[in-house]
Image: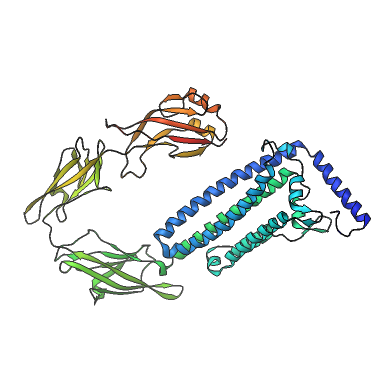
Amino acid sequence: MAGGKLSPRQKMINLMYLVFIAMLALNMSKEVLSAFGLLNEKISDANQAATERNVAFMDGLATKASDEPEQYAAVEAKAKEISAITSEFDAYMQSLKAGAVETIEDPTDYEVMDKPDHFNNLFFTGENLKPEGQKFIDQMNKYRTEMVAILSDTAVAKKVAGANEIIASINDTFGTGEVEKSDGTKQDWLNYHYEGFPLIASLTKMTSLQNDVKTNQSEILQKMLSGQQAAALSFSNYSTIMDVEKSAYYSGETFNGAILLGRTDASTVPQEVNLTLDGRPLTEDQYTVQGGKVVLNVGAGSPGDHKIEGTLVYGEGGEKVEVPVKTGFATISKPNAAVIAADKMNVVYRGVDNPMTVSIPGIPDNNVSASATGLSKISGSKYVMRPGAGREVTITASGTLPDGQRISTPAKFRIKDIPAPQGAVRGETGIVRMQRNGLEIASISAVLPDFDFDVNLQVTGFSFKVSGQPTVRVNGTRLDGAAKGALRRAKRGDAVQIFDINAKVQGSSVVLKKTSPVIIELTN
């Protein structure tokens, strides 16, 4: 401020201004500095939560893009660009903050962060910017221009409601032009925001900028996905499905399946039905339209596959939209063998009730019986199997066809032990971040992630370990007095271990494998 070709009077004024700023810094209330520090902590916590939300969103979007690439691949590509831009700017801000406090013994002692020296020396030289100061401006400009370029893309703007408002907000928040001061004079952006301010105030401003980019990312990604999902509701993005009462039909039966759209309300009635069965056009007496469904009434034909193709024509925005139909059904001969399947699995598990379905196509459930060691009937075709010792079990299904012929078919199933459970707190496994008071009242449980069916596991006790303190053995599912006492002596960020979890299957004597531990990272 005192450099360049200035008059002696102007140099004196600038020098007095610097002295005034220094006096303000020296006299700044310690309470104000602490308040800045607490605000910085709260914004940092919000940034961490925003980061976790954005990561979870990207993981979910990746799954959608994998499952439905035509709808979501382009959205994922743009989302990755936005995430990369955000991560680069966030990392740069974090590096500046880390460098500012690396020589401070206690980064939480905000009362010592009352000097402006660090960023003054890093960014400024007289009235000019040092390379690091120019780099700060360049990073701001880069983030702003790259984000505006993405939001200005026509394909993105169609999916992001209020894209112009977001662009205006980004231009305003990350603009680096001159700032008009209260006295009407103008000052360079970086000088206005960071020259002469206490260190903790500058750090808080940088944390706030990090919050702005993470919030922008979250808002834009959510609106992009919402826009894509809204577009997916258009008739042009629908496909047809077949709704049938049973999976196969006997020769000579009437096929009564229904072709319908994914949205089956009465407003989805087609204006025209242009369908063929095995290449032959269907006449109006071979189908009826009922509540959005095109219900067919045609002969099932000879055994084999039959194709139904054509289009359903709907009205949308005053225009006709053709939805292609390409489906079919199979006609099979009368069966002479049973079909036995295990619900949701290809094995049965020892010591627990495995849900089973036993049926024979074409034979009513009351004329079908099944037998095996450990098998019991619930109702209709539903059974439960609780296998005991051994590695295999054979289930034999028998039934009588309408023509009086009796059939009997055996099927073998492998018997496996239940996999090792995982310890859980609040239903979460592995490493869990939570507050101390939440852990005090939380219930410890054991779960079988991705298991084929529900198994009721009961926890009877566990070991509780806080670093640097003796292990506490707890009976039951919640922390007792001794465990709570150990927890209260833990520090923020400490990892608390819950291990040696005793779990059993309710109503069963089966011995489970060792339950894996759960680790809790304390957030306060």
Q: What is the basis of the colouring in this image?
A: rainbow
- Compared to 458, does 315 lie above or below? below
Furthest-right residue in this view: 9
Residue 191 on image: x %, y %: 77, 54
**Residue 513 in the image: x percent, y percent?**
32, 34
**Is the N terminus in the top left, top right, bottom left or bottom right quadrant?**
bottom right
Q: Does 490 sit left or right of 39 as displayed?
A: left
Residue sitting nearer the eye, 470 or 315: 470
- Whether residue 230 appears in this view of the structure is no
Q: What residue is drawn where x is 65% and y is 62%?
A: 168
Of the pair 150 and 280, the residue shown nearer to us = 150
* 403 up-or-down from 507: above or below: below
Q: Does 33 sit above or below residue 268?
A: above
Residue placed most toward the observer, 329 or 103: 103
- Could you tell me if residue 43 is visible in this image? yes
Q: Quadrant of the C terminus?
A: top right
Which residue is depicted at the point 24% across and 70% down?
A: 307
Taking the image as shown, residue 298 lies to the left or right of residue 114, namely left
Q: Residue at x 57, y 46 (%)?
A: 48
Q: Quadrant of residue 448?
A: top left
Give left or right: position of 96 versus 363. right
Q: Position of residue 49 (x, y in %)?
A: 55, 46
Horizontal arrangement in the rendering, residue 105 relative to residue 451 (left or right): right
Quarter assignment of residue 274: bottom left
Please state the total of marks drawn on the protein image: 0
